[in-house]
Amino acid sequence: MLKDVEISRVIVENYMKGLLDSLTVDVAIVGAGPSGMVAGYYLAKEGVKVAIFEKKLSIGGGIWGGGMGFNKIVVQEDAKEILNEFGIDYKPFRKGLYVADAVEVAATIASRTVKAGVKIFNMVEVEDLVIKDGRVCGVVINWTSVKMAGLHVDPLTIEAQYVIDSTGHEAQITQHLLKRGMIEKIPGEGAMWAEMGERLTVENTKEIYPGLYVTGMAANAVSGAPRMGPIFGGMFMSGRKAAKEILEKLKK
């Protein structure tokens, strides 16, 4: 006999088991967009304990809509090997540039990231950082619905050796450092310039404060670099770069 309460019990028990296990992680990633998930994948693949917190119901960031709702994305030669790593199909349309199906890209990266061992918590918003002795060492979380409703409900904390801000154009996690005067400014992203934006999103991927990395469009927003539209190679390479640098530091 199928009992309604058994369905509720197995959902609650398994969710809570995953949450309890993720209260202390090696790396907490904020934002389950392309750079965040790629970073999580490469970290987890090497045995690093990773949790991603996404405030929206859906994950994948801006991949799904491609350009203006046309669900295709562009990837350049330098990032093609990452598509190969994930087993994503693509077609060349001129030398050095490839087109891929946005839905396949988002769904495949999400699936491979979870299968690599990353715990993804959607509908959970990071409302602050944990900072001790001049170093970011965790995040402060609450339900997105609580934040949307403006309810006075105290949050919980996640302990992490590193935090990655993969929140996109607004660099929402880095904003917490700005409002406390721990960094001087966040200039915001510049106007559209795909070629420069793609290059700089990788160059700007770095540790901007002890324990805090920025990736993807958050990296460009923090550095004042251009946006780039529906070309995603830079996002993928940004996530991979952050993962490689954090892996090196965790091994020391």
Image (spheres, rainbow, N blue to C red):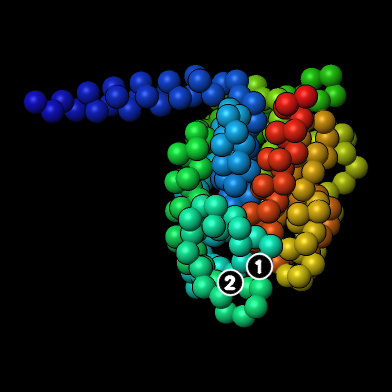
Q: Name the residue under label 2.
A: 98
Can residue 213 be seen in the rendering of this structure?
yes
Q: From the image, which quarter does the C terminus lie in?
A: top right
State the separation of the CA atoms marked 1 and 2.
6 Å
What percent of the width, then of the height, locates residue 160?
67, 25
Q: In this picture, is 14 found above or below 98?
A: above
Which one is nearer the viewer's eye here, 59 or 85?
Answer: 85
- CB atoms of marks 1 and 2 within 8 Å: yes
x and y, in percent, of residue 211 in the image: 77, 30
Q: Which residue is drawn at 47% across and 64% down?
A: 89
Picture coordinates of residue 223 (x, y %)? 84, 53
User: Which residue type carries mark 2?
Assistant: Tyr
Give the amino acid type for the residue marked by disc 1 in the picture: Gln
> Is residue 93 depicted above or below 49 in this figure?
below
Residue at horizontal 63 percent and vertical 50 percent from the top: 35
| In-front residue for pair 209/251 | 251
Percent of width and height locating residue 232: 63, 62
Question: What residue sits right under mark 1 in the picture?
Answer: 76
